[in-house]
Image: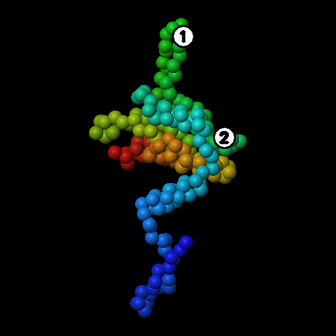
Amino acid sequence: MWYWMEPSACPTARPPQPCSPPLQDSETEKRRGLWTENIMSDSLVVCEVDPELKEKLRKFRFRKETDNAAIIMKVDKDRQMVVLEEELQVVTCCLLSYVYFWPQNISPEELKLELPERQPRFVVYSYKYVHEDGRVSYPLCFIFSSPVGCKPEQQMMYAGSKNRLVQTAELTKVFEIRTTDDLTEAWLQEKLSFFR
């Protein structure tokens, strides 16, 4: 429903303009906000996030290890779903009642070698970041690898699924690379320097 504003008495007044109806109460305001939020976020969703991946991302977010680690995700075209492709972190092996750990402290340069050069991928990367003042933090970075030369259909599926995945993983440090060669230590540190 639209309401019309009355033109003012001024001779240069514009013709009546549509405006939204006044809010009746906080409940109406809340519903309108939810409606707008749902329309905006749902209109771009192409693929849902696999429930197993959601759980994996939740556990990854609260991991205790301090090494660099990554989760690489892809879109399963047949299922129309974002799924886990590979997990790069500490490997644990039990052999003859001994537990062995092989840390895979994966650098950005090593991570780039795991990404396909001609296909998009999503990456959640836990990175040990040393600030200029000496503080150490472990930010979770979302990296969308969308290389030039991908099929347009693939790019649309990934781009349309990105926002939902970022919301699901509850990440704020979101970056995009157009070629895997962009993913370097210097590039990541430059991007993270904008965050305090």
Residue located at (45% from left, 59% from top): 27
Q: Which mark is residue 130?
A: none
Of residues 97 and 121, the one nearer the viewer is: 97
What amino acid is at disc 1? Leu
Q: Mark 2 highlights which residue? A: 76
Q: Mark 1 highlights which residue? A: 95
Task: Report the Cα–Cα distance between label 2 and label 1.
Answer: 35 Å
Residue 86: percent from left, percent from top: 58, 32
Residue 192: percent from left, percent from top: 40, 44
Q: How is the image coloured?
A: rainbow
Quadrant including the C terminus: top left
Total numbered badges shown on the rendered structure: 2
Instruction: Report whether residue 40 is seen.
Output: no
Quadrant including the N terminus: bottom right
Residue located at (44% from left, 42% from top): 188
Instruction: Report whether residue 175 is seen.
Output: yes
What amino acid is at disc 2? Asp
Residue 26: image quadrant is bottom left
Residue 106: percent from left, percent from top: 49, 30
